[in-house]
Image: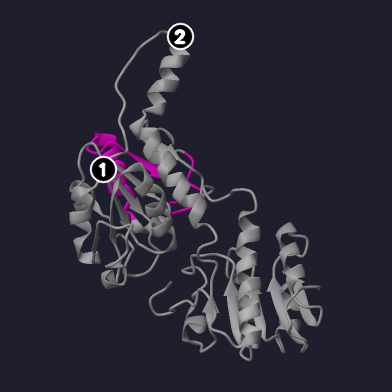
Amino acid sequence: MSGATSYHNSMRVLVLSDPAAPHLKVLSKLPDTVDVVVTRDPEFALEKADGAEIIFNALFNAELLRQIFPAVQGAKWIHSISAGVDHILFPELRASSIPLTNGRGAFARSLGEFVIAGALYFAKDFRRLFATKASGKWAQFDLEELHGKTIGIVGYGEIGRAIAERAKPFGMRVIAIRRRPELSAQDPLLDAVYPPDRVADLMRESDYVVAAAPNTPGTRGLIGEREIAAMKPTAVIMNVGRGQVIDEPALVKALTAGSIRGAVLDVFNQEPLAEGHPFYTLDNVLLSFHCADHVDGWIDNAVAIFVRNFDKFVKGEPLENVVDKEAGY
């Protein structure tokens, strides 16, 4: 494969993927001297795993990586195309000393836009606008501004910051939860940052609550019945992180009772969402089917992170997006 990097020593990169996947064209930026092996066949992958220095898991599951993992103990680096790594951190990989990086940041911009779209959907009451138009009758009613409203972000990583970057120009007050709030104490986008034990406080203050946290033991069910009960009755909750962060039965209960205004959801506890799930029929729910980040070139951007990291790897520079295996992200 041709490319502009200056690395000339031969090495094997094992890419776990459908060889026909169009986004793999981005790998053409790797040097010609790199032995790039692309396969999703378990037997062939196992054969090529021995001697592979780099493993690029370009599948959105860990099944094949788990199967061949015993044969890749000599690898010096593993990269996951996805940003979330809860599905890939099987015990053997978690215990391994092999560095793991991920696609964090590749999807942040589009998810930030989706959150703003969801906020506008409720603020401008698009559902009522559509219904009124369909009725064929002229009917004026009042709408809202995002200006002056508070958006609370649970999980202030790449996605969280992308949300803040887009909310601030609307004149919104931005507050956030992160595990180490001191890391964002000077962030000009934030009006306040709280530790995880203050989730209920954030929920109480916010007009729009956005879950953008990874799925880890510390975040599962982080937003439960108590936290949802703390929300304003006019508030909207959104989830663009991981479905497991929000207690779904508690959320369904609140939405059905009308104790909160609504929800904007892109991720769920189980996917695909089961047929007949209440989210399909609740009028106060805006659904995306885990495709809010499926914009033009979205997977290309994720592969580009691997290529950028490859250049750092061969130069001996620190890798981007190194996963803290114990923290789970």
Query: Helix, strand or loop at disc 1?
Result: loop
Q: Is residue 41 above or below residue 326?
A: above
Residue farthest toward the top in the current orientation of the protein: 137
Residue at (40, 34) in percent of width and height: 121
Amino acid of disc 2: Gly
User: Horizontal and vertical percent for residue 136?
Assistant: 46, 9
Judged left or right of residue 9, residue 175 is left
Q: Nearer the viewer, residue 324 or 159?
A: 159
Q: Is residue 328 above or below residue 96?
A: above
Query: Where does the magenta region start and end?
Result: 246-275
Between discs 2 and 1, the one toward the N terminus: 2
Query: Helix, strand or loop at disc 2?
Result: loop
User: Horizontal and vertical percent for residue 270?
Assistant: 46, 53
Residue at (34, 33) in percent of width and height: 123
Residue at (79, 81) in percent of width and height: 35
Q: Nearer the viewer, residue 200 or 65?
A: 200
Q: Which residue is mark 2?
A: 136
Q: Is residue 266 visible?
A: no
Instruction: Kindly report which numbered mark, 2 or 1, lies closer to the viewer in this rendering.
Output: 1
Of the 4 image quadrants, the one containing the N terminus is: bottom right
Q: Which residue is mark 1?
A: 207
- Is residue 118 located in the magenta-colored stretch of the structure? no
Judged left or right of residue 47, residue 149 is left
Badge count:
2
Q: Is residue 309 visible?
A: yes
